[in-house]
Image (spheres, grey):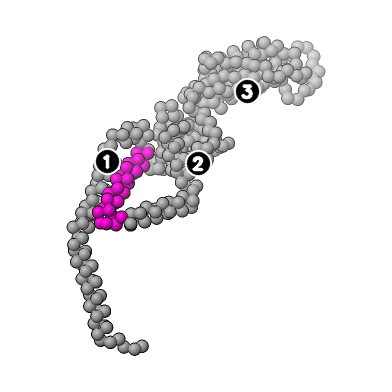
Amino acid sequence: MPALPSGDLSDRFGAALDQVQAKLLALAAGAPLLLLALVIVVGAIWIGGLLSRHLHILTRLSKRNPYIDGLLRGVVKGVVVLAGVLVALDLLGATPLIGALLGSAGLVGLVLGFAFKDIAENYVAGVLLSLRQPFSPGDTVRVDGHEGKVVALTSRATVLMTIEGNHLMLPNALVFKSVLLNFSRNPKRRFDFELDLNPGASLHGAMDAGIAALKSLDAVLEEPAPAALIMRILPVGATLQYAGWIDQTSSDLPKTRSEALRRVMKALLITANAAGEPVQRIRLERGEAETQLPVDENGADRDTSVDHALDDQIGKARREETSSDLLKPATHSREHTP
């Protein structure tokens, strides 16, 4: 490699030194502007935090839904800080950089939106569910064929506990788009069951006896009143439907239905021997037939109180989800704190 002439080398070194000196001078001259830009950014951060803590509209929204409080305050603070950064860049004469940053941010946001579409969809659905509050902790719901008691609503999923005590996590997007049945929102709930009657049994007698048996059960409400309906009349007998209402805050539906079924069956056997059998049999008897009750049918009444078997487990699961739970307890909720 041929050696550079000493004159060229000294000229290049002098030019480089001049450039460094010019940049240092420019940096020194721009130091006040740079310091002012830094002050603007720091001030924006302080103002953003102050506004997010004391903005009255956010306080009102937080009282209605305190679980999105952090999200709203973070958005307000982020907007103020972004405005401060843009002002600082404009002050430094970096206007082209602002456009480049905004364009890059839009492109990155588009790419991330496609890459994390499901996560973003579940997050937005979680925020909307927290605003609408279609259920509360402890409510019994059915979503897309899945049934259980509500444990928590996180930013990603709705957590249920099934009757078997299993944790069920449903994506928020699925919960938001599906038909949701809340069994607990209305404290009054109806139950019903069907019983077959023997051929020739009195329909009026069977209906009156069943209604009287339902009224004798304390858990069954007087209003709406219990009812009996004829569902089918066939050559082998008739089918009646009995229905009653309970208050879910004090009575358990499966327990009450079970006890009501026992009492109505007992009433039909005692009053008219009307309860039918699924299999028809021919019996040859001498003398008058006696009504036979099932063994121990005259025992004590069964318990119909609210079932708290899952309450301790739901309470424990809720304490584990407290940091990310977007739900607030409601007065109608049957959540039990051990």
**Residue drawn at 45 percent across, 29 percent down:** 334
Q: Secondary structure at mark 1?
A: helix
Height in image: 214 above or below 5? above
Q: Amino acid at mark 3?
A: Phe
Disc 2, SS: helix
* Label 2, residues with CA under 10 Å away: few <14, some 14-19, many ≥20: many
Pair 2/3: label in front:
2
Give the alpha-carbon distance from disc 1 to disc 3, as whole Å: 59 Å
Assess whether residue 125 is covered by the magenta stretch.
no
Task: Name the residue beneath numbered marker 1.
Answer: 51
In the image, residue 329 lies at what x, y percent? 40, 32
| Segment tinted magenta in the rendering | 68-95
Mark 2 / mark 3, whichever is N-terminal = 2
Q: Secondary structure beneath disc 3?
A: strand
Q: Answer yes or no: do the residues labelled 2 and 3 have beta carbons within 8 Å?
A: no
Q: Residue 173: which numbered mark, if any?
A: 2
Residue placed under numbered mark 3 in the picture: 193
